[in-house]
Image (cartoon, rainbow, N blue to C red):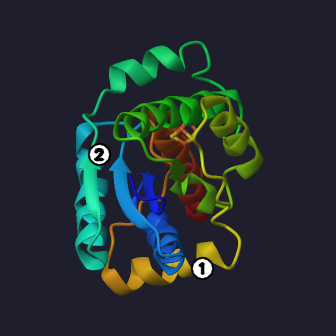
Amino acid sequence: MSRQDILLHTCCAPCAGGCVERLLEENRRVILYYSNDNMCDIGEFNRRLDSVKLLAEHYGVALEVDEYRNDLWMCDIRGLEDEPERGKRCEKCFLHSLRKSAEFAGKINIPFTTSLTVSPYKSSKMIFSIGRELGNFAEYDFKKQNGYLKSTRIAAELGFYRQKFCGCRMSALQLEQKEKQKNGSTQK
Ligand code: SF4
């Protein structure tokens, strides 16, 4: 094992771009791990995956794709379906993805981290605490050093698919409701 190797759990290409640049600047050898059981359906899973493939190709990094198992994710968040975004459902959702990433990283004997910390909508503190429990987790707060802006710039330059919702069916529903309200208020 090389000490520079790191597995980057990748939720989507628009988030992961800035993370990959930072890790490469630190001379890490990056392996992307696309694991997205939380996606509302296989169509959304594949749309995001297509852009992750472009990202991997652009930076010349390896990509591992985890099979889509929304059934397992639904079991893990059962009873928390109505929680608001950034609440307990999201905590379980992070745990689900990070656990799978930790298992894969363990198999190839390298540390792992996650692109989730780049989002200003996600608590790095919560993510770090889950990572610490799982072990072998590298604590990168990718929001720092203008990480989010960097990711946004890369996404625009490389033409990544940019979704307007977090990913699960509950967040898709929330977006739909917001848009209905917006359209309702503009029609008045
Ligand atoms: S809103 Fe996002 S982080 Fe929260 S449960 Fe849904 S997909 Fe996971």
User: In what element is the residue under mark 2?
Assistant: helix
Which kind of residue does numbered mark 2 sit on?
Phe
Of 165 and 143, which appears nearest the observer? 143
Question: Where is residue 128 shown, x and y percent of the image?
Answer: 70, 44
Tell me whether the residue at label 2 lies in contact with that at label 1, contact meaning CB atoms closer than 8 angstroms.
no
Q: Looking at the picture, does residue 188 appear above or below residue 57? A: above
Check disc 1: other Cα within 10 Å, few if <14, some if 14-19, many if 20+.
some
Q: Is residue 89 left or right of residue 105?
A: right
Q: Residue at x 66, y 34 (%)?
A: 130
Q: Quadrant of the C terminus?
A: bottom right
- Residue for badge 2: 45
For residue 149, the mark is 1
Task: Name the residue: 39% across, 66% down.
Answer: 29
Element at label 1: helix
Looking at this view, is 135 or 71 the one in front?
135
User: What type is the residue that disc 1 sits on?
Assistant: Leu
Mark sitting earlier along the chain (2/1)? 2
- Front residue of 87/132: it is 132
Tell me the quadrant of ligand 1: top right
Q: Position of residue 15 (x, y in %)?
A: 49, 64
Measured as percent of width and height from the top left, residue 134 is found at 60, 31
Q: Decide: is 63 above or below 73.
A: below
Res. 132 image quadrant:
top right
Q: Position of residue 62 (x, y in %)?
A: 26, 61
